[in-house]
Amino acid sequence: MSKLEDRENRRRSTVGKIVGQTPMAAAGSGRRGRPKEDRELKKRISLSVLPSLYEDIQKIAYVQRKSASEVVQEMMEEYRKRHIEKLGEYERLQAGAEVRR
């Protein structure tokens, strides 16, 4: 057998092992990398904003050394704090709607 054939057979053997594995087995025993934390995952959303507004948010983020996403998240958290009573009102309305059903 030539060197080329030998090399090709080894490649096929290795590729066959990888392809034949289940996705979980391919990922390993789960011990590599950082351990998983019990934390809230971020949700990816899409917003429509005026281009000039987005540009200004990007400039502010640049000066603050943050991403535009972090700036928007902070604004949303602040908005939630200022309107926390509305969340309670929403819960009461939902509870009332459940009772009527």
Image (spheres, rainbow, N blue to C red):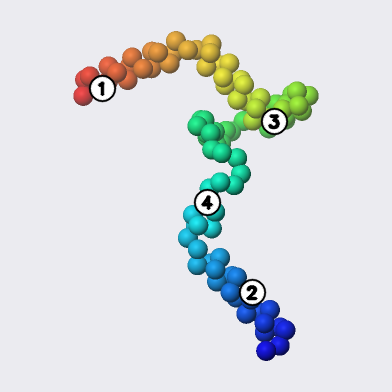
Q: Amino acid at mark 2?
A: Arg
Residue 92, how many percent across, how many down? 33, 14
Q: Do tag 2 and tag 1 residues touch (Cβ < 8 Å)? A: no
Q: Residue at x 54, y 68 (%)?
A: 17
User: Dot 3 surroundings within 10 Å: few (below 14), some, or many (20 or more)?
Assistant: some
Residue 53 location, quadrant: top right
Amino acid carrying mark 3 in the image: Ser
Q: Earlier in the sequence, mark 2 or mark 1?
A: 2
Type of amino acid at the residue the image marks with label 1 = Glu
| Residue at mark 2 | 11
- Mark in front: 4 vs 1: 4
Label 4 crowd bin: few (<14), some (14–19), many (20+), radius 10 Å: few
Element assignment for label 3 = loop
Residue picked out by circle 4: 29
Q: Secondary structure at mark 1?
A: helix
Looking at the rendered image, the disc whose residue lies closer to the viewer, 2 or 3, is 2
Q: Secondary structure at mark 4?
A: loop
The quarter holding residue 52 reads top right
Marks 2 and 3, Cα distance to the nearest angstrom? Answer: 44 Å
Residue placed at 36% from the left, 17% from the top? 91
Q: Nearer the viewer, mark 3 or mark 4?
A: 4
Q: Which residue is mark 3?
A: 67
